[in-house]
Amino acid sequence: MSPTVFNESGFRFFFFSREESRMHVHVHCGHGEAKYWMEPEIELAKNYGLTTKDLQTVRQLVEANADAIRNAWRKHFGS
């Protein structure tokens, strides 16, 4: 199961239900994917094919939606 938190600018922001417990969000578009840690601070964890421009856009979207991402995590994982 991988619930979508939101979609914006061609990117899907989502979680995998059965993955590590450290708060993070996955981001996918047609040509790549990335993973961002949400705690203790927002940080790129992994990049699979996203361009530097994509990563800049995604970082801005993660930062702008950080509260919504964290709230969705807590709601989904119950923590």
Image: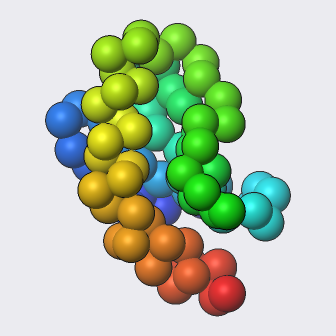
> Which percent across, then down, holds residue 26?
54, 44
Q: Quadrant of residue 40?
A: bottom right
Residue extending furthest toward the left: 9
Image quarter in which the C terminus is found: bottom right
Instruction: Indicate the quadrant where residue 34 lies.
Output: top right
Of 49 and 58, nearer the camera is: 58
State whether residue 11 is above or below residue 47: below
Image position of 22 (left or right of 7): right
What residue appears at the point 52 percent right and 85 percent down from the top-left corner?
A: 75
Residue 64 is at least partly visible in this image? yes
- Quarter containing the N terminus: bottom right
Residue 35 in the image: above or below residue 30: below
| Residue 2 appears anywhere in the view | no
* Nearest the eye: 52 or 21: 52
Q: How is the image coloured?
A: rainbow
At which x and y percent is residue 78?
64, 88
Q: Position of residue 3 (x, y in %)?
A: 48, 61
Residue for point 39% across, 39% down? 59
| Residue at position x 59%, y 43% in the image | 43
Q: Looking at the image, how many numbered discs can be counted on the residues?
A: 0
Q: Position of residue 65 (x, y in %)?
A: 32, 61
- Most extreme residue toward the right is 20
Q: In the figure, 71 relative to 38: above or below? A: below
